[in-house]
Image (cartoon, rainbow, N blue to C red):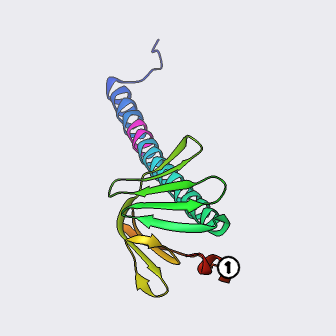
Amino acid sequence: MKLKGFTILELILGMLLTSILFSIVILAYKMFNQQYTSYETLTEENLSLNRLHSLLQEDIYRADYVLLEGNWLQCIKEQTTFYKFTKQFTLREIEGRTDTFHFSVIELRAEFQNQAVDFDWVEDLELQLQFGEKIVNLTFRKTYSKQQLYYK
């Protein structure tokens, strides 16, 4: 009486096909994981850039005066908000709390009444930031009242 079973060749072929299938599944998982990680990083950078833009815009809008001293920007109201722009990051300091934004500031341009300023009031501010592979320009404008300009 003959027993039905698999030959050694059939078993080896089955193991080979199973290992190829597992290799494909592992490769697909690694690719998916890498894609997700890069998407997550890009999303976090986008959120951070949007947060910096909205905070700076709000601080400039609410300030009575905006002053630039070198790479420090001061938004002066009841409480002063400081921004420090460097090649590695941007700092925002308010009431003892510091926020750090990891964007490289390539260029900082400031003007008051169409004149470039380094240590004076700021009316127009333009930041050029390195955002991954891209360069992003952020532009802000502070409008002063006649009374504020009179006391300058």
Q: Specify whether residue 25 is in view.
A: yes
Residue at screen point 65% across, 69% down: 61
Q: Quadrant of residue 10?
A: top left
74 to the left or right of 11: right
Q: Quadrant of residue 53?
A: bottom right
Q: Is residue 88 above or below residue 27?
A: below
Which residue, as the protein is rendered here, is positioned at the far top?
A: 1
The quarter of the picture where the C terminus appears is bottom right
Q: Is residue 23 above or below residue 74?
A: above
Q: Nearer the viewer, residue 72 or 132?
A: 72
Amino acid identity at mark 1:
Gln
Q: Position of residue 137 (x, y in %)?
A: 45, 74
Q: Position of residue 23 (x, y in %)?
A: 38, 39
User: Circle 1 — which element?
Assistant: helix
72 to the left or right of 147: left
Question: Is 6 in the magenta?
Answer: no
Q: Tell how many labels.
A: 1
Q: Specify whether residue 127 is in view.
A: no
Reading the image, the residue beneath label 1 is 147
Residue at screen point 64% across, 67% down: 64
The segment highlighted magenta reads 22-27
Q: Nearer the viewer, residue 134 or 11?
A: 134
Residue at screen point 47% across, 15% down: 3
Which residue, as the protein is rendered here, is positioned at the far bottom?
A: 114
- Please tell me how crowded label 1 is: few (under 14), some (14-19), or many (20+) other residues with Cα within 10 Å: few
Q: Nearer the viewer, residue 103 or 59?
A: 59
Q: Main secondary structure of the magenta part?
A: helix
Q: Position of residue 139 (x, y in %)?
A: 51, 76
36 to the left or right of 134: right
Which residue, as the protein is rendered here, is positioned at the far front?
A: 151
Residue at screen point 67% across, 79% down: 147
